[in-house]
Amino acid sequence: MRGPSIDWGVILLNPGESMAEKAHGHNFIDETFYFVEGNGIMIINDREIEASEGSIFLVEPKEMHNIRNKSDKAIKIIFIKGEYKPEDKI
């Protein structure tokens, strides 16, 4: 769902997949990640954090982040950004 005041959706990562090839960040907006189904690894500023089902992470502006599925099952993560600013990427 993308609109002027919100940007959110569901990320599906199969075993061994990452959200992106390398970490990325945003200059102005924060981003929340909710692990709806399965366990993965949340990476924030090169720090790897175990993310079990039900975990929630708030990534602040300028924090570089990525997600990796190290399990043998698919994982689902909801992401929420307060604004839709596709150009806000570092």
Image (cartoon, rainbow, N blue to C red):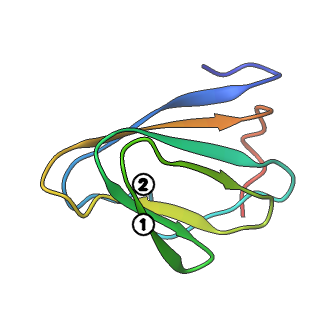
Whole-angstrom CA distance, mark 1 to mark 2, is 7 Å
Along the line of sight, the residue nearer the viewer: 85 or 38: 38
Extreme bottom residue here? 46
Extreme right residue here? 28
Q: Is residue 82 left or right of residue 17?
A: right
Q: Residue at x 36, y 44 (%)?
A: 53
Dot 2 amino acid type: Met
Q: Residue at x 82, y 22 (%)?
A: 5
Along the line of sight, the residue nearer the viewer: 85 or 16: 16
Q: Under tag 1, what secondary structure?
A: loop
Q: Residue at x 24, y 64 (%)?
A: 70
Q: Is residue 1 left or right of residue 39?
A: right
* Picture layout, residue 70 above or below residue 33: below
Extreme left residue here? 72
Along the line of sight, the residue nearer the viewer: 81 or 3: 81
Name the residue carrying label 2.
19
Q: Residue at x 80, y 59 (%)?
A: 61
Dot 1 amino acid type: Glu
Name the residue carrying label 1.
21
* Picture layout, residue 65 above or below residue 35: below
Graded by Cα atoms within 10 Å as few (under 14), some (14 to 19) or many (20 or more), the crowding at tag 2 reads some
Graded by Cα atoms within 10 Å as few (under 14), some (14 to 19) or many (20 or more), the crowding at tag 1 reads few
Residue 79, horizontal then vertical, whole percent: 57, 38
Residue 28, horizontal then vertical, whole percent: 87, 52
